Amino acid sequence: MKLNLCGKRVKLARIERNLKQVELAAALSVDMGIELTQKGISNIEIGVRRVSDIELVALAKILKVSAHWLLYGDKKEK
């Protein structure tokens, strides 16, 4: 059972920005004060970890996409 809507798009945006999971986790920590491990990022991407609203906004900022795009994949909102 998937626990989030955004995992696949987090992975797509991360790869598009040439970031490794550990690099995304570090950016979230340093830039946004969000503590996620590489395993946490992995679990988000495969849909087995829930994402809080604060984490969603932070992921969107770091990945330079909209929170709306992470949730729904609407290309116009990316």
Image (cartoon, grey):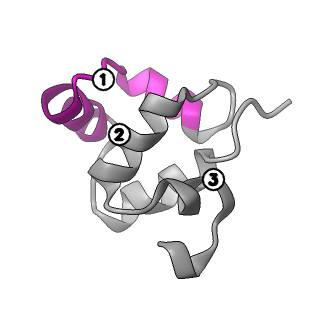
Q: Earlier in the sequence, mark 3 or mark 2?
A: 2
- Residue 6 lies, in percent from the top left, at 61, 47
Residue 58 circle label: 2
Residue 34 circle label: 1
The answer to whether mark 3 and mark 2 are in CB contact below 8 A is no
* Residue at horizontal 49 percent and vertical 61 percent from the top: 12
The answer to whether mark 2 and mark 1 are in CB contact below 8 A is yes
Query: In the picture provided, is 18 more to the left or to the right than 39?
Result: left
Q: Please, is residue 8 above or below residue 22 in the view?
A: below
Camera-side residue of 52 and 20: 52
- Give the Cα separation between the discs numbered 3 and 2: 13 Å
Whether residue 29 appears in magenta in the rendering, the answer is yes
- Residue 19 lies, in percent from the top left, at 28, 52
Q: Which amino acid type is shown beneath numbered disc 1?
A: Ile
Outermost bottom residue: 76
Q: Which amino acid type is shown beneath numbered disc 2?
A: Ala
- Residue 57 lies, in percent from the top left, at 42, 42
* Residue at horizontal 31 percent and vertical 51 percent from the top: 61
- Residue 11 lies, in percent from the top left, at 49, 52
Outermost left residue: 30
Q: Earlier in the sequence, mark 2 or mark 1?
A: 1
Q: Which residue is mark 3?
A: 71
- Quarter containing the N terminus: top right
Q: Which amino acid type is shown beneath numbered disc 3?
A: Leu
Q: Main secondary structure of the magenta part?
A: helix
Numbered range of the magenta stretch: 22-44
Query: In the picture provided, is 12 more to the left or to the right than 64?
Result: right
Residue 19 circle label: none
Element under disc 3? helix
